[in-house]
Amino acid sequence: MKDFKRSKAILITLFICAVLMCAGWIIAQKWSISTLKPDQFVQDKEALSRLLENSSEIQRIWSEGEDSREWISLKKECLSYYQITETFDESLLRCNPMIFECLNRFNQKLNFRFVKPDLSDDQNQKIYRYLTKSNTSHIGLEHSGYLFTIEDKKNRKHLNLFLADQCHEVFLQNRTYAYGEEILEKKSSEETEDYRFDNFNQNIYIDQHLVMNSELNEWIDFGNPNFTEGLKKSDNKDYFLPATSLTYSQMENYCSFKGKQLMQAHIFDAATFLPMDLNDINPKNNNRSPYYWTKKKSEFKSDCSLIFAKECLQKKNFKINSTSPTWAGLTDSMGGPFEVFRNPIDPESNLKAASYYFNFKSPWHKLGFRASWDGEDFDLRHFDFKGINPEIIPQKFQVGFRCMREEK
Amino acid sequence: MKKRNGFQLFVLWMIGICIAACLSACLPIKISDVNLAEAEMKLYNEWLYTFKLKHFNFNNELITRPPGVEQYLFNLVLPSEGGINLKTHCVYYQVPYKNLSGIIKVIEQKNESECPEVSSLIPWFELKEISELQVKLENFKLILNFKYKNKKTNWSFVLPNINNGFVHQKYQSIKVKKLFPELTILRINEDSFDINFNKYLGKLSDRFSRGSSIRCQQVNKDCKTIGEYRCDSCAYGWYEVVDFSCPQGGSKFCGQNHCGEKNEPACPRGSKVVSSEELGICQSDLTSVYNSDHTLVCQ
């Protein structure tokens, strides 16, 4: 009897426990769902909506660059911060993180803020990472570019924005081209015809301008250190100058880091020799002028905006995009520093010698006529100018480069 | 003795109820029970990163057939956490019929794969009491109009990563047909920068001449692509070789391009202005010959 009473008490206790637990669980669920969560999710949605609007604005600034109202209002402070006193071609600010660095630093009116990748207190820390397919595991990247994280000021929700830096490339029209100087006199049986080729089955994109120091800095900061060992980052004031101190294999590796290749000599010729008839994409002959601005073979001009030759250095310093673009859109194709190519036809002819090391009268100022560089170092013994040496030999020559790539 | 056994059974039954109550508290909340805002955000927080929308064939028509039967609508391919993998969300809809509730269901597959016609796995997302569903894609927005518990609802998911192809125009940089052309929204966490998860193809040291280059597209003699096109996944870019003079070009390899050099493939020279013996570019002291794979190589 005692046992029965005790059991009954346990039974009732357990029953009450079960009922209370069930009721408690149901109430907790109902309360949490119906009162707290809707607000939170509505706020999240609004924050996401604001972040997407801001993304659209960020994309606009990215593509407008120097034409954006943001740059116009920030320019003075920004250049002063970077200690850039020399003028430069401001079109280089398109697809460039500099505007966002300054926007973050000097514009307090934004309803979002940029979140730095690391949590350190370093004031000079960049607000972005440079991503390529070799330094990130995030799948689906189409190209290399910059990763920014923005945070909604109200809600603190984050969004990671990847901005591709392809806007300084130009598409090489699908057509017939020729390599090297035009052969005017029959020398031997092998050299009676032009070396012609076409790219009808290839979509080729070429860097408009020489690789800049600021781009090289990204490689040093975000590339595989095994390949950038010993390279020094450039000062802010030299950001928009060409990178001219890499060896040939370092140049190849830099282009590979960006998913590209070092510019090939015959493709450079294709993008620089002015086609006689732009509408005829498959002409019978590829007649060509040695000057990219004219179809006339004799129309040479001693003009610093066409060839940045030795004389031009007395008037102004060389900057990226000092000379007019070729028909395909490449700048500094004549004059400026040397430019090296990978030449799959004649590897010894790999250097555009038309540069500020030679005056306007030099025979080097012709398209398709190339000197040689062994790619190892920068003093005279590493160059072969075919007997047409510069009058003044610097301790180190400056050799620039650009990249190209194919697209599906 | 009999009484005691019956009592013990009753106690066990009560303990069972308690355990069941505890377990049920641990089970995930059924979306059909929670509010619509949470359901919408659950989808939005994932679908925002969608790279591809596949098998999508809707233009806002009312989905009324087949009544009472679940049907596959479309799928979305999106990155997993940290973007280190792709996954697939298969979207299903059961049209309501008599006592059968209308249901939107999403099944998550842990890779990029085709969806079964009928959902089989435990749904990653389920919303019941749906009717009059309409679906459309408008200006990179996936729009779902429906009635939830007979109340009109509109969900609009922006899909900024959907890419409708490229435009190649002379003198111009590449144009990507996207909502924000140069912008992609990534799903970043610490794993995104852990190089051990990197699935991009090839090493910088890979060379065709050493046999270490990865072929990312293979074209056969009938100019058909064999297998998958993987060149978008090359870690250090890719280059094309000369093989069967196909209109879409030749096979492609990942890595640094050394075409024209000794034991490397010949560079493409096109086919409009040269004879069939001169389709490749090699250094002037080398000649081009076809290897056993019918790739033109400089020797």
Image (cartoon, coloured by chain):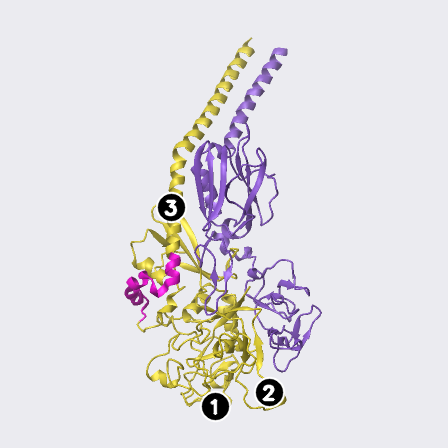
Most common secondary structure along the magenta stretch:
helix
Q: Color of chain B here?
A: purple
Instruction: Give x and y (percent) for residue B143.
Output: 46, 44
Residue assigned mark 1: A388
C-alpha distance separating marks 1 and 3 = 65 Å
Amino acid marked by disc 3 = Ala
Horizontal side of A153 relative to B127 (left or right) equals left
Q: Which chain is yellow?
A: A
Residue A118 makes an appearance in the image: no
A252 sits to left or right of A326: right
The chain letter for the residue carrying disc 2 is A
Q: Earlier in the sequence, mark 3 or mark 2?
A: 3
Mark 1 on the same chain as mark 3? yes
Considering depth in this image, is A370 or B205 the residue closer to the camera? A370
Q: Is residue A345 magenta?
A: no
Q: Quadrant of the C terminus of chain A?
A: bottom right
Which portion, as a residue range, is magenta?
Answer: A58-84
Q: Residues within 10 Å of mark 3 (few under 14, many from 20)?
A: many
Residue B143 showing in the rendered view: yes
Q: Which corner quadrant of the image does residue A76 belong to?
A: bottom left
Alpha carbon distance from label 1 to label 2: 25 Å
Q: Earlier in the sequence, mark 1 or mark 2?
A: 2
Q: Is residue A388 above or below residue A264?
A: below
* Label 1 vs 3, first from the N-terminus: 3
Expressed as whole percent of the image width and height from the top left, the position of residue A258 reads 50, 66
Q: Which residue is mark 3?
A: A47
Element class at badge 2: loop
